[in-house]
Image (cartoon, grey):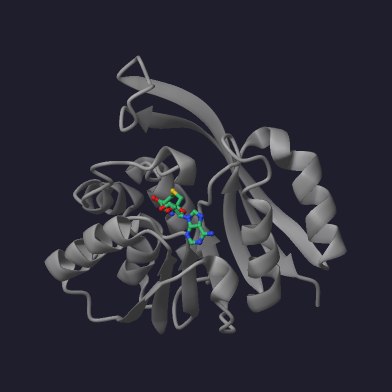
Amino acid sequence: MINSKKQLAIALSGLQVFTDADIRLEQYPTDSEVAAEVLWFAQQNGDIEDKIIADLGAGTGVLGIGCMFFEPKKVIFVEKDKKAIKILEENLFELQPKIKSKTIHSDIMDFNEKVDLIIQNPPFGVKNRKADKPFLEKAFSVADVIYSFHKPESKKFIDTISKENKFDITNYFEFDFPLKQTMKFHKKRITRIRVGCWRMERKA
Ligand code: SAH
C-alpha cells in the first residue's frame, strides 16, 4: 500500500531504467520524484482509480506502473523500442501488480483504443523538432483526460493545439528535471532541465 507521495517516489525509484538509451528516440526516464508528484496529484484528483489508462512512449514504464498503485481498471503501455519494453516487462515482473495490463510494441500512431486517461512523457523534440506533436494529437483523439510532459517553452504551442482540439488546460506543473547521464554526450553526471506537465481535459 502506498500512503504518501514520498512512499510512491521511493517505490518508483526502485524501477529499472534504460541501460543503453537511444538518442534519436530521446530516451530518458521520468525522474521518480517528479513522477510521484504528478501521479499523487492525479490520484487525489480522481483521474486514476477505475480508469483505463494508456502510457504512450512508455519507455521503461515509470508513469504507467506508478498508476498501478492506485487501482486503475487497466494500464496499456505503448512503446516502439524493443529494448525499453524488455526492461518495462522486467519491472512488471518484479512488482507483480494485481492490475490488468497490456504492453503494445508499436508506434503510438498505430494505437487507436479509447481510454479514459493518457499519461505521457514523450520526446520533447530536442533532436527532432515537434516530436511531441503526434503524441498530443494521438492523446486528443483517444482520451478525455491527458497528463503530458513538455518543455516549458512549448506553452504557446500547447495552448493553441489544446484549444484546436477542444481541450481545456486545467493544471500546470513545472519541475527541475534531473537528467542522469544515460547518454554519452552529456558531460556532467546530472544536468537539470526545466520540464512542464500539463493536465488537459476534453471540454464538456
Ligand atoms: N515515458 C517514459 C519514457 C520517456 S522517453 C518515462 O517517462 O520514463 C520517450 C519514450 O518514447 C522512449 O522510450 C521512446 O522509445 C518512445 N518513443 C518515441 N517515439 C515513439 C513513437 N513514435 N511511438 C512509440 N514510442 C515512441
The N terminus is located in which quarter?
Answer: bottom left
Residue 3 visible from this viewpoint: no
Residue 43 visible from this viewpoint: yes
Q: Residue at x 52, y 62 (%)?
A: 119
Please tell me whether residue 121 is drawn above or below residue 144 in the rendered image: above
Q: Residue at x 23, y 62 (%)?
A: 86
Where is residue 33 drawn, in percent x and y?
36, 42
Where is residue 105 drawn, in percent x and y?
39, 71
Q: On the image, which quarter does residue 201 sit in?
A: bottom right
Specify whether 131 is left or right of 46: right
Please tell me whether residue 19 is drawn above or below residue 65 in the rendered image: above
Q: Is 117 in front, or is 58?
A: 58
The C terminus is located in which quarter?
Answer: bottom right
Where is residue 44 drawn, in percent x and y?
48, 64
Q: Residue at x 84, y 51 (%)?
A: 160
Looking at the image, the residue that sits furthest to the top is 188
